[in-house]
Amino acid sequence: MMNAKKQDIDVVDEENINQDIFDRQKRLKGWDQEKISGSTALVVGAGATGNELVKNLVLMGLGRIYLIDFDFIDQSNLNRCVFFTQEDAKEEKFKAEVVSENAKKYGRTNVVPLVERIEDVDPAIYKECSVTASCLDNLEARLQLNSYSYYHEIPFVDSGIDGFQGSVFCTIPQVKGTPCLQCSMSSKDLDIMWQKFSCTGSEIDSKDGNTELKMANIITTTSIIGALQAQQVIKIILGIDSYLKSRSWNSYVGPPLHGRELRYDGTTNKFFFHEKMKNPSCWICGNQSNE
Ligand SMILES: [Zn+2]
């Protein structure tokens, strides 16, 4: 295990090391708490992964999160959503509003709930954001956020979960030549999407001849993927300025996941990379003049 040297640690006030909420993370070389606390993210989906992602970003002290979800809480959400209670489900409260209320208790992050669909979000909001993230259970909406984020030139962190499997992938418009989420969609993927298959593209089990539209979902996979996604959000916030200035990412926190997807398989206990290729004729990112 590596031990940080004292001179490497940015300790603000040695006498109050246990009083500063963020002291332990400020000890990470390359960390910039002011930058994180001054940044805004747009998160679409306040379900299981959204709960985990927002929880992590709130604990790390992100300044503001626009949280978009028009759905309300039901009992079946309660096996994997840290912010929801039985009472919330009984009253059918809106997911985004309940996450926002709970986040307030930490007093660090302003989680602004937007109970609406992605297409209804005020475009001005994108201009305030350093990064977007999707915590969605359908590919169509994920591709929609990919397209809005690319249009506004905002890095986008995507996730997909299906039972014991999950994936994380970043589309970073500023890194020319790297694929967006749409690039890797084959016509077969799109066919699958229109048939309302799962978010990782695998077929949902049919029961009694009817397609069951709900996927298997457990908190352990959701926690792993939500945490990986939060890590990408923070790495982008800490590194994008350096990348834009010198084409190199913050060397202490490393580059975010772009150009390849990180996949997790809980049945084999393995993480692995799935390489993605840019599609020159991609209708979202394929016509960039400076590739
Ligand atoms: Zn593309």
Image: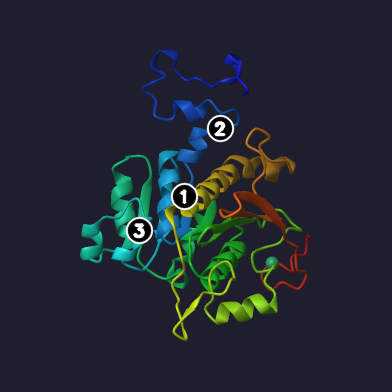
Task: Examine the rendered structure and indicate whether residue 142 appears above or below residue 27.
Answer: below
Camera-side residue: 199 or 11? 199
Residue 86 appears in which quarter of the rendering? bottom left
| Labels 1 and 3: the sequence-earlier one | 3
Q: Amino acid at mark 1?
A: Ser
Q: From this viewpoint, is residue 179 visible? A: yes
Q: Quadrant of ligand 1?
A: bottom right
For residue 241, side relative to residue 100 (left or right)? right
Q: Position of residue 95 (x, y in %)?
A: 33, 61
Label annotation for residue 31: 2
Q: Residue at x 32, y 40 (%)?
A: 106
Q: Position of residue 252 (x, y in %)?
A: 65, 32
Circle 3 is placed at which residue position? 113
Q: Is mark 1 within 8 Å of ligand 1?
A: no
Q: CA distance from mark 2 to mark 1?
A: 23 Å
Which numbered disc, 2 or 1, marks the residue closer to the eye? 1
Q: Which residue is mark 1?
A: 223
